[in-house]
Image (tube, rainbow, N blue to C red):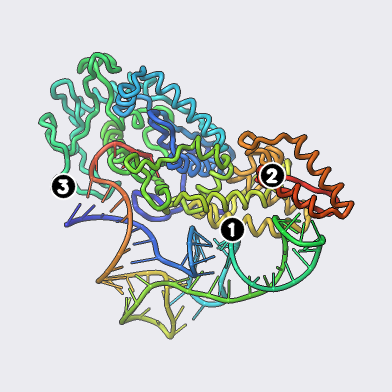
Amino acid sequence: MNNLKLTNSFTRKKVIFKPINSKKISLYACGPTVYENPHVGNARTLIVFDILFRILKVLYDSKVTYVRNITDIDDKIIEASHKNKKKIYEITNKVTKIFHENCKSLNCLLPTVEPKATDHIKEMIQMTSSLIDKGYAYKNKDHVYFSVNSYKDYGKLSNKNLKELKAGTRIEISDLKKNPMDFVLWKPSKDEDPGWNSPWGRGRPGWHLECSVMSEKYLGKTFDIHGGGLDLIFPHHENEIAQSCCNNNTKNLANYWVHNGFVTINNEKMSKSFGNIVSISDAVKKYSGQVVRLALISAHYRQPLDWNDELLKNQKNVLDKWYNLYTEENGNITEVDEILLDDLNTPGFISKIHQLYSEASKGDEKKILKFNQACKLIGLFSLSKSGWQSFKKDSINVSESYIIKKIEERAKAKSEGNFSLADKIRKELLLKGVLIEDQKNKTIWKFK
RNA sequence: GGCCACGUGGGAGAAUGGUUAUCCAGAGGAUUGCAAAUCCUUCCAUCCCAGUUCGAUUCUGGGCGUGGCCUCCA
């Protein structure tokens, strides 16, 4: 039997995945904070864990619970609401809607549960109270802080040591904190900002708490896999672990921690100050969700991935080719290739698909099906062939009947030996974004 | 300063203690009225130094270089 191997950030080693209960696999991935349009970096995380979810479903007969949260209360959201002069919920609803559209266009499966932070305030207050009672947290002037000194394993995931962190120069020192590294569990809200009543006055939860609370509620005190972007290791995941393990008196929050690398844009870090953030919506509009998906898995998930036009163009050409052998037939996907099981080696698997294509192109139907299944396993071929061909239709101002008319005119010119006219028609269509290909007995067209 | 990752052909990107993926680009060919698409063939690589080894791109140590985290960030 093939084993799934994952690189566990906790040990920085690639290990064989052994679930707590093979009848109920638990996967938690940090979802978005809904304050602005999700970008292609978010998309990478989405797709990586979507593929992991798909693999687990095949391996464990669909007995997988995949939780992906939505953080809809956070300082960044409050900031955005002030800036745009909009109510909090207007922003969170709008961004959540866009996020869902993005997920769909990228062909990500729906998670089993998609809990929202604001639906779990009560549980967060409970956890905060409990941490105070147990001596891991303390109140100071309407704030509640987690005391990092109370947890001896603090820093273990991110491989940081408290003494060195203290020596760091740029930590904001709040007088309210006992230790500069202590982080907030609850903080007061201004009257105009969103807040909930709590034993410490009207306020709101600190970041991190929502994931601790929701993962426990839907997956239990210790679960199988917790994932997210590389930058969440510290402080987000470190703090989640501290809260949860102290509160539950457990050794681990999750047995496997999986983190994906960053997306750079033309070799630059994606950031607001560079103004080079590419939103999923824009990327999908420009290249289609399929192409974006394939591009984002063209490097191994732990490696950095550079987003540039050449990459996207390349992936589009690959899909154009692969769609030659597209079939509606799905069959039953019952196994996962060893390459993919080896720490989700998607580039290696893509290479395998190229080989499968090559074999299948000779016409053997079984091989064609196998090729299709491989594509579908990693979430490709979500569109039918015609859907794929016309994904750019909206941005091209030519009607299908016009194209067909022109092709007929050209066929006539060709039969009369008037090749210069035929070439002229072809050139005109190309300028309009329509590519013509003469096949044996017919002429086909596609959007460029 | 601390921690971490990475350095493979012109570009992208896997893998591997010995037999050198894959894609794009380049070259040649088949096909085509010409193209396009497709197919076939083909050129090109493992940052530097030392060690382990019969043998290292792969393991170990050192160096150089790049990037990330330590502050909100996927």
One can see residue A322 in this view? yes
* Label 1 – label 2 distance at C-alpha: 29 Å
Q: Assess whether mark 2 and mark 1 are in contact (beta carbons under 8 angstroms).
A: no
Marks 2 and 3: which is nearer the front? 2
The disc labelled 3 sits on which kind of residue?
Gly
Which residue is located at x 52 percent, y 34 percent?
A103
Which residue is located at x 22 percent, y 23 percent?
A187
Q: Is residue B6 above or below residue A204?
A: below
- Front-most of residues A216 and A292: A292
The disc labelled 1 sits on which kind of residue?
Ser
Mark before the other along the chain sequence, 1 or 3: 3
Residue A356 location, quadrant: bottom right
- Front-most of residues A242 and A429: A429
Q: Is residue A78 above or below residue B37?
A: above
* Label 2 – label 3 distance at C-alpha: 58 Å
Disc 2 marks which residue?
A: A434
* Helix, strand or loop for disc 2: strand
Q: Is residue A332 above or below residue A186?
A: below
Marks 1 and 2: which is nearer the front? 2
Point out which mark residue A168 bears: 3
Position of residue A147 measured from the top left corner of the image (x, y, whole percent): 18, 34
How many residues crowd around disc 3 within 10 Å: few (fewer than 14), some, or many (20 or more)?
A: few
Mark before the other along the chain sequence, 2 or 3: 3
One can see residue A325 in this view? no
Left or right: A130, with B48 as reference point? left
Q: Quick check: do tags 1 and 3 share a chain? A: yes
